[in-house]
Image: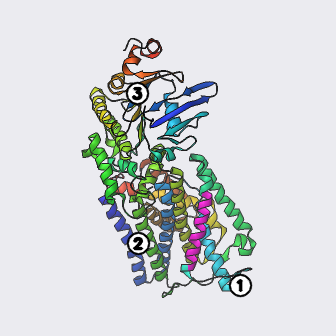
Amino acid sequence: MIRESYLNTFVLALLIAVPAWAVVANEPFTITLATRAVIFALAATGLNIALGLGGMVSLGHAVFFGIGGYAMGILAHHAQTYTPLMDGLFLIEGTKSMPVIWLVAMVTSGIAALLIGLVSLRTGGVYFIMITLAFGQMFYYFSISWATYGGEDGLSIYLRNDFPGLNTLVPINFFAICFTILLIVLLLNALIAKSPFGLALNAARQVPQRAEAVGLNPQRLKLVAFVISGVITGLAGALFADLNRFVSPTMFSWQTSGEIMIFIILGGVARLCGPVVGAVVFVMLEHVLGDLSDYWHIYLGVLLLLVVMFVRGGIVGLIAGKHVAHD
Amino acid sequence: MTDPVLATYNLNKSFGALKATDDVSIDVRPREIHAIIGPNGAGKSTLIGQICGGLASDSGRVTLAGQDLTGTGTAVRAKAGIGRTFQISQLAMDDTVLQNVMLGALNISSSPWRFFRPALADRDLRDKAEAALARVGIADLDHMQVAELSHGQRRLLETAVALTRAPKVFVMDEPMAGLGADGSKALTTLLDGLRQEAPILLVEHDMDAVFALADRISVLVYGKIIATGTTAQIRASQAVRDAYLGDEA
């Protein structure tokens, strides 16, 4: 446990040190890579609340990632084309303000998670995986056919959105925003895991019969965890779209869902910084191996196999040892 | 006669052609231990499921302290005051003993819908949990992981979780299962004292424990209650001997 907190500190320190070095060395691309890792880590931290704490193997988290992305894309698109989003009863205009976009992204993905959770949580095991995957595909094909917002081509946003008091086009500023959000979410995640809700959710995952016998409703606990999870991944989606200044149906694809899950499995399921470690390793491999070969996913696959077969608890488990329940 | 705490009226449950429970009416009165005995497959587990809410009855009613619980779910019945223990320990293996017991007290003294304060910092929750552990005699194990406990310690923990809830009635499904002689003796003493707090519906195979503890015994055979009476009456009953006890009593 102590080793795990050292490891967590180390990883987060590394995530500050590398971009800081890149500023000095004038390597903006490295900052972009670090930002990418931070946003992936945030998306996977969201999934880790459903998967790690709640035991819900969702293969549809791209839905929330994509909704966050499109929330950013649609709002910014209307702002940059000076067209209203809606002018019926009310006039709703687009916006370039990041905080507003985040709020919209979180609320819409929260609603989606509530509806998807209500349906999916009636099932369990493999059926849960399949239903969440099916929802993912629904959103994917819907986004492809949604011509108003670019269909298959997606939406390009010319300028990164605004954050009060910061020039977001400077890479390190945008990195700082994303990293701060990740830190806040990790802190909240740590608090939730130890809270009465975390205790109850933990029981709902491990011994649902017991949870019911002490008057708890396992399904409701899981549903709330699923919504929290979706909200966080949705926020990550909005940031990801802002990083690329581009959103497309790829964000909704099942490959995206799979990648978010791979970050967690690589890093360590239910470990606080498992998703962070997984995302950092993934982005590093993507960069280093991607330079060597277009087929770098083969190496990723081999690594994933090794981790799953020989290291229970992912990379964090390998370094910090078995998860211990002590307070 | 005092009003029963827990009562069932003509409970029925069939699985296909098999009648698992057949018109079962039993009651548990204040301060008593009412044991249910019967051979394997007699319908004891089905009955417990119908009382605690896991199984929907085909017909019949269940009441707790006069409140009709028929048709409600497990969580509702638990909140109403049924404190259940399981035949096979249902414990969160990865968690500590203390965390498992605190879970029992959730929903009693504090809501599970709190997200930011550590559960361990909740004095009231912790006090309840530690008191229950002390009561069953495993207070010194509170920081152990459940996976590291012996079977006997898990059985005690299982009882402690139900204790934290200060239920109106305990429904215990073979609490002695798998315990050695010393273990069942200790648990017998514990249950003996417990009836003053809340009566116990005890399903148990350990006849020594049943005869030592029970105020009344009901015998369940093929889903039917064939006899209900005091320990002496049941020991003396020819029908019960034929159906179940054999030469043992």
Q: Amino acid at mark 2?
A: Leu
Could you tell me which chain the residue with mark 3 belongs to? B
- The answer to whether residue A44 is seen in the rendering is yes
**Which residue lies under the disc numbered 3?**
B204
User: Which label lies toward us, 1 or 3?
Assistant: 3
Q: In the rendering, at what x and y percent does residue B84 appear?
A: 43, 39
Residue A112, x across and y down, in percent: 62, 63
Task: Give the quarter of the figure containing the N terminus of chain A.
Answer: bottom left
Residue A15: give its label: 2
Q: State whether residue A86 is above or below residue B139.
A: below
Residue A83 tag number: 1
Give the magenta part as a residue range: A100-116
Marks 1 and 3 close (CB-CB < 8 Å): no
State the CA–CA distance, disc 3 to disc 2.
59 Å
**Colour setup of the view:** rainbow
In the image, is residue B126 part of the stretch drawn in magenta?
no
Camera-side residue of B200 and A54: B200
Q: Amino acid at mark 3?
A: Glu
Residue B166: quarter of image: top left
Q: Main secondary structure of the magenta part?
A: helix
* Residue found at the very far left of the displayed protein: B140
Chain where mark 1 sits: A
